[in-house]
Image (spheres, rainbow, N blue to C red):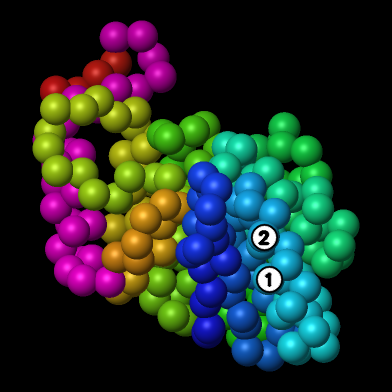
Amino acid sequence: MEIFNLTEKSAVYTSNVWLCCCDGAAQGGVLIDTGCDPAILEFLRERKKEIGKSPVSKILLTHNHYDHARLIKEIKEEFQAVVYASSPYTTGIDQILTDGDVISCGRYHFEIVSIPGHTSDSVCIYCPEEEILFSGDTPVMIWGTDNTYEKTFVHGFEELAKKKFHIIYPGHGEILDTGVVDLIRQSLANIHNSRIIGFNIGEEKY
C-alpha cells in the first residue's frame, strides 16, 4: 500500500491527512481524516489526473475535531467519497462506525478500534495486511503513571495492544516506526499502574 501524507508541507495548522492507495480498488483509495488545509484539494485533483479516476472513495475520521474534519463537505462533494465516523453529530457523515467494524478497500481492510479518551468519538484504524495503525489523536506514548483513565479508554488500549503492527501513523507529528511493540507494551503497563475510573460514582481503581 502506498501512503501519502497530504499535509506534510502545510503552511496552516492541520492534522495529518493520510491517503491510502489500495491495490485492486476500483473506486479509489481511503483518506484517513480530511484536515483543514485547502491545499489538500489541489493534491487530490492532480492525483485524479494522474490515475484517471477519483483518488478517494472512502473517508474515515478518527474523531470530529476541526483540524481533522474541516474539509469533509468539499472532498465528499468533489470526489463522491463516502464518509465514515464514530460520531453521529458530524455533518456529512454517511455511515456511523462502531467498535470492530471493518471497512474494505481493494485487498485491504481497515478495522475500527474505539478508544474514547481524547474525545468521546475517538477511534484508531488498524490495517492487518500492512500491520499499521492510524492513531488519530489517541495518545500512544504514555510515559508515567500519574494520569487518570476511564475504563473505556483502558479497554480500547488493551485491544490495540493485541494487534500486530510495526508502524503508527499519528494524527500529528512524525510516523513512529522504531520499537513500536515495546512502546505499546510499556504504555499499557503504565496505564494499568495509573488511576482507573469507571462511569459509576465511586467506582475506581488505584
Kind of residue at badge 1: Phe
User: What's the mark number on residue 43?
Assistant: 1
Q: How many marks?
A: 2
User: What's the mark number on residue 148?
Assistant: none
Q: Residues within 10 Å of mark 1 (few under 14, many from 20)?
A: few
User: What's the mark number on residue 39?
Assistant: 2
Q: Answer whether labels 1 and 2 touch (C-beta < 8 Å).
A: yes
Residue 162 at x, y percent in the picture: 31, 62
- Front residue of 63/19: it is 19
Element at label 1: helix
Question: Is 88 displayed left or right of 170 in the figure?
Answer: right
Asked where in the image residue 83 lies, by quadrant, the reply is bottom right
Q: Quadrant of the C terminus?
A: top left
Question: Is 98 displayed left or right of 153 in the figure?
Answer: right
Residue 19 at x, y percent in the picture: 59, 70
Q: Residue at x 82, y 88 (%)?
A: 52
Asked where in the image residue 78 lies, by quadrant, the reply is bottom right
Task: Magenta stretch: give its range.
Answer: 177-202
Q: Is residue 18 magenta?
A: no
Q: Residue at x 78, y 58 (%)?
A: 75
Q: Residue at x 29, y 22 (%)?
A: 197
Kind of residue at badge 2: Ala
